[in-house]
Image (cartoon, rainbow, N blue to C red):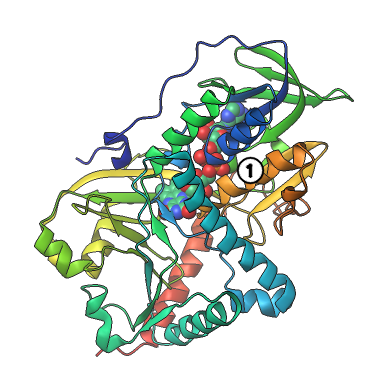
């Protein structure tokens, strides 16, 4: 049986931090100690604010130590579709911020000396269906024209240079996307926030949040606290304590499996460039070699894992073997899941509601976005002009007929599977 904890925890586990006393008051309470919460806490503590961060689990036990470590700053709506929907100027502003946020993460890691196996290896995206190659080409041309990003087209004839499979109808390589070790990044950020003076309370849920006219009264599992400002950074792990937010963010489970170590020769055959990888189908997979190049980590949508922590592992393994038949005998050492958060328009968000700052809705791409929008939330509290962001918007709209239990997800998954089936039939495999 595979281990159900993340492969990343072999190197470093979320620490137990629950012994610090809760003071009566502080300047800022941050709810959630993932990348977003820690980024906000670090910025505020360095600006001299007295900051207390609360997490209902161990700090990092949410998505920030469970993810694939693909530092893409991807946005779900493609650039072309955003241009169509919002016009070229607004779409350009949004996508330009993705570039800036991605580069800023790399600078941050270097500047702060965080040892998190950051590797600027690029990402290959395979066209799952014949018609998708055109979409990838158009997106590549737009990125070249507007941002000077030299995306390389990979024709079907050249695909073995990038990936040892015959499943794709060509693809593209984005050179500006990196891989990293997510748990090491989180540990680095946690250490920096604490060194800057922020107090981080693990296993301490915030159970109530109320405005008092001049700030906020909060109840936590270890006592009450009063704060001038609050940042909520709970993304896919929001609980019943904030019903208003739960109507706006839909938690979606994502699973990753890790193979046992494979030989270098086999890795050369399957992922010769050691890049991050993805594909265009609706129920897409994201995958990569581990930072030491010894295993393949393969992720995708996961059925409801509440009653079975390994739910969906077998089907994910089958899909891995469909892609790479050479892995049919490879064992699976780890299989774990976590929650990402989607909102109605699938764009990350920074917003202020009733005086509370929120950074949320990273739609499965929070390695770049959570840190970035946590930083922006802190700058906004500090009144810093650099707080400006294309993602500082009104709160996402509530999802109709939804109260925190995403009953409709199996139907959405079924619909996406149906669309993938149709597209598959329309693609001629040679
Ligand atoms: C399997 C998987 C693979 C992924 N792969 C990638 C990838 O390759 N690239 C990428 O960019 N992104 C990826 N993501 C998404 C990325 O991990 C997240 O977007 C990001 O980590 C979100 O960070 P966060 O700080 O907003 O939230 P989280 O790290 O999820 O932290 C939220 C925290 O809030 C706490 N919390 C909730 N309610 C309360 C409360 N009432 N009181 C106190 N604390 C509370 C939770 O305990 C949790 O620790 C992946 C996610 C998953 C699950």
In the rendered image, which residue does mark 1 sit on?
A: 375
Q: Could you say where residue 183 lies in the image, as x and y percent from the top left?
A: 39, 39
Residue 110 appears in the rendering: yes
Looking at the image, residue 24 lies above or below residue 368: above
Between 184 and 340, the one nearer to me in the picture: 184
Left or right: residue 404 versus residue 296 is right
Residue 239 appears in the rendering: no
Between 311 and 57, the one nearer to me in the picture: 57
Q: Quadrant of residue 198?
A: top right
Element carrying mark 1: helix
Which quadrant, please, contains the C terminus?
A: bottom left
Left or right: residue 48 versus residue 413 is right
Looking at the image, residue 195 lies above or below residue 71: above
Q: Could you say where residue 42 lies in the image, as x and y percent from the top left?
A: 59, 33
Q: Could you say where residue 39 lies in the image, as x and y percent from the top left?
A: 58, 38
Looking at the image, residue 351 lies above or below residue 218: below
Q: Could you say where residue 325 lies in the image, as x and y percent from the top left?
A: 16, 68
Q: Residues within 10 Å of mark 1 (few under 14, many from 20)?
A: many
Q: Residue at x 40, y 58 (%)?
A: 178
Q: Quadrant of residue 306?
A: top left
Q: Quadrant of residue 224?
A: top right
Left or right: residue 306 versus residue 50 is left
Q: Residue at x 44, y 82 (%)?
A: 132
Q: Residue at x 21, y 52 (%)?
A: 295
Which quadrant, please, contains the N terminus?
A: top left
């Amino acid at each position: 049986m595979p281990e159900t904890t993340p492969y990343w925890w072999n190197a470093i586990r979320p620490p137990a931090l629950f012994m610090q006393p809760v003071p009566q008051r502080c300047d800022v309470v941050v709810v959630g100690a993932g990348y977003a919460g820690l980024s906000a806490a670090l910025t505020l503590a360095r600006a001299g604010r007295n900051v207390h961060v609360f997490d209902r689990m161990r700090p990092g036990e949410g998505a920030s130590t469970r993810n694939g470590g693909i530092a893409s700053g991807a946005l779900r709506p493609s650039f072309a579709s955003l241009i169509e929907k919002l016009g070229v100027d607004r779409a350009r502003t949004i996508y330009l911020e993705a570039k800036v946020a991605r580069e800023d993460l790399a600078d941050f890691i270097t500047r702060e000396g965080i040892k998190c196996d950051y590797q600027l290896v690029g990402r290959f995206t395979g066209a799952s269906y014949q018609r998708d190659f055109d979409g990838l080409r158009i997106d590549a041309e737009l990125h070249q024209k507007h941002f000077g990003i030299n995306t390389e087209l990979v024709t079907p004839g050249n695909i073995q240079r990038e990936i040892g499979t015959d499943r794709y109808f060509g693809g593209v390589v984005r050179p500006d996307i990196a891989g990293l070790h997510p748990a090491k990044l989180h540990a680095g950020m946690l250490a920096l926030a604490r060194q800057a003076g922020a107090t981080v309370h693990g296993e301490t849920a915030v159970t109530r949040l109320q405005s008092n006219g001049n700030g906020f009264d909060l109840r936590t599992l270890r006592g009450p606290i009063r704060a001038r400002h609050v940042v909520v950074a709970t993304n896919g792990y929001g609980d019943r304590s904030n019903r208003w937010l739960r109507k706006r963010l839909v938690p979606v489970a994502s699973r990753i499996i890790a193979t046992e170590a494979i030989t270098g020769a086999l890795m050369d055959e399957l992922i010769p460039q050691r890049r991050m990888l993805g594909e265009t189908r609706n129920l897409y997979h994201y995958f990569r070699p581990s930072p030491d190049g010894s295993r393949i980590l393969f992720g995708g949508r996961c059925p409801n894992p509440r009653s079975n922590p390994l739910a969906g592992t077998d089907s994910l393994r089958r899909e891995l073997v469909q892609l790479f038949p050479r892995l049919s005998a490879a064992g699976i050492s780890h299989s774990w899941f976590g929650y990402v958060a989607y909102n109605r328009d699938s764009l990350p968000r920074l917003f202020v509601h009733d005086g509370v700052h929120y950074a949320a809705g990273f739609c499965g791409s929070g390695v770049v976005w959570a840190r970035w929008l946590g930083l922006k939330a802190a700058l906004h509290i500090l009144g810093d002009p650099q707080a400006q962001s294309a993602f500082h918007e009104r709160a996402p709209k509530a999802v109709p007929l939804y109260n925190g239990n995403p009953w409709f997800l199996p139907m959405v998954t079924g619909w996406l599977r149906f669309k993938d089936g149709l597209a598959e039939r329309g693609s001629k495999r040679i």
